[in-house]
């Protein structure tokens, strides 16, 4: 589907707002997963605000499901949930405090919109596959999206799910690999290089696509191509930048889960103001 410039601009603006919400959740001194939440923010905006079927009631059975297997990036989902009205701004500010309900990792019992408990890396794609197969058995048209980290690919269970997804021809399942090249403490290539990812997922029997994960048109086109593909699941390798949008943090493992200084926080606020302006041009 071709998208108009206005639609793309609106989505970029939404992504800027989500990054503003992210910064709102981690004021100076409060530790949070800035890097991996920001790298997946453009995909998050495209999913929740254009591509997925979402409803005012987050439990509506017709909804598409989204599982963040890299559960530590749940701040990106919380930002989307605030814009969707599933949680309040007050909830956002109380994230990871004893007064709040929003946890540091996804909690399906207490957070409307969360579909699965994740955080222990490696498990979410199996859960998402189970959901996809269950929905198919029910004759539902709902689809399932799963966000996986590139460091997370070190977990063997991901590849079990990759084999099973292709074997069961789960064409209602889309895995999005957030290839930001950095994991918790170092570059993916220095910890355990994972090589040619598109070719690997294709060899496992998936419809494998590779995109710039910060280019809204490419993200939407890939999601549409996934929807059109029948007989096999789709893996979208999204090349991204860890900490995208926040220059002091971009590409740095140090901002995987960090507390910002007062100065960095001010820089982050300036950055989101710039992003908003650029998105409107
Ligand atoms: C099973 C398991 N082992 C270790 C961790 C600790 N941990 C949290 S995030 C992370 C790095 C993940 O890297 P990546 O998947 O690339 O995430 P991103 O860079 O997108 O944030 C690790 C090792 C965990 N959550 N679960």
Image (cartoon, rainbow, N blue to C red):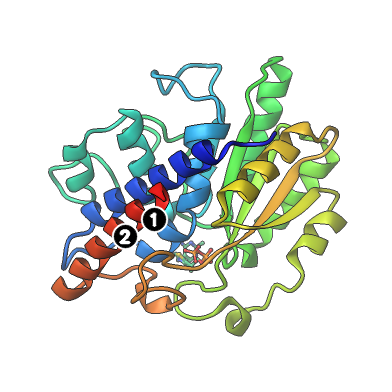
The one of 193 and 167 positioned closer to us in this rendering: 193
Residue plotted at (56% across, 30% down):
52
Give the percent coordinates (x, y) of residue 24: 22, 52
Residue 59 vs 84, above or below: the answer is above
Q: Which quadrant would residue 262 be assigned to in this image?
A: bottom left
Residue plotted at (18% across, 42% down):
100
Residue 82 vs 74, above or below: the answer is above
Residue highlighted by disc 2: 274
Q: Which quadrant would residue 155 be assigned to in this image?
A: bottom right
User: Which residue sits furthest front?
Assistant: 281
Q: Is residue 171 visible?
A: yes
Left or right? Give the position of 53 relative to 126.
left
Residue highlighted by disc 1: 278
The one of 82 and 13 positioned closer to us in this rendering: 13
Residue plotted at (30% across, 63% down):
271
Left or right? Give the position of 28 relative to 188.
left
Q: Which quadrant would residue 269 be assigned to in this image?
A: bottom left
């Amino acid at each position: 589907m071709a998208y108009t410039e206005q639609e793309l601009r609106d989505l970029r603006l939404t992504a800027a707002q989500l990054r503003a919400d992210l910064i709102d959740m981690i004021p100076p001194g409060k530790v949070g997963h800035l890097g991996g939440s920001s790298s997946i923010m453009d995909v998050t905006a495209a999913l929740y605000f254009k591509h997925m079927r979402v409803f005012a009631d987050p439990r509506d059975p017709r909804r598409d499901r989204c599982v963040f297997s890299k559960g530590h990036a749940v701040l990106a989902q919380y930002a989307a949930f605030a814009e969707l009205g599933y949680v309040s701004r007050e909830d956002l500010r109380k994230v990871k405090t004893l007064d709040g309900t929003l946890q540091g990792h996804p909690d399906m019992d207490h957070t409307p919109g969360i579909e699965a408990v994740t955080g222990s890396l490696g498990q979410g794609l199996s859960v998402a596959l189970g959901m996809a197969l269950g929905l198919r058995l029910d004759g539902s048209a709902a689809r399932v999206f799963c966000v996986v980290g590139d460091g997370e690919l070190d977990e063997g269970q991901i590849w079990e799910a990759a084999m099973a997804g292709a074997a069961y021809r789960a064409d209602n399942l889309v895995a999005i690999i957030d290839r930001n090249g950095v994991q918790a403490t170092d570059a993916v290539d220095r910890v355990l290089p994972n090589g040619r990812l598109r070719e690997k997922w294709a060899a496992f029997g998936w419809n494998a696509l590779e995109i710039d994960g910060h280019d809204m048109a490419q993200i939407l086109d890939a999601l549409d191509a996934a929807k059109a593909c029948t007989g096999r699941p789709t893996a979208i390798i999204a090349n991204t930048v860890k900490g995208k949008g926040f220059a002091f943090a971009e590409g740095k493992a140090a901002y995987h889960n960090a507390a910002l200084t007062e100065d960095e926080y001010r820089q982050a606020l300036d950055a989101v103001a710039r992003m908003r302006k650029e998105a409107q041009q």
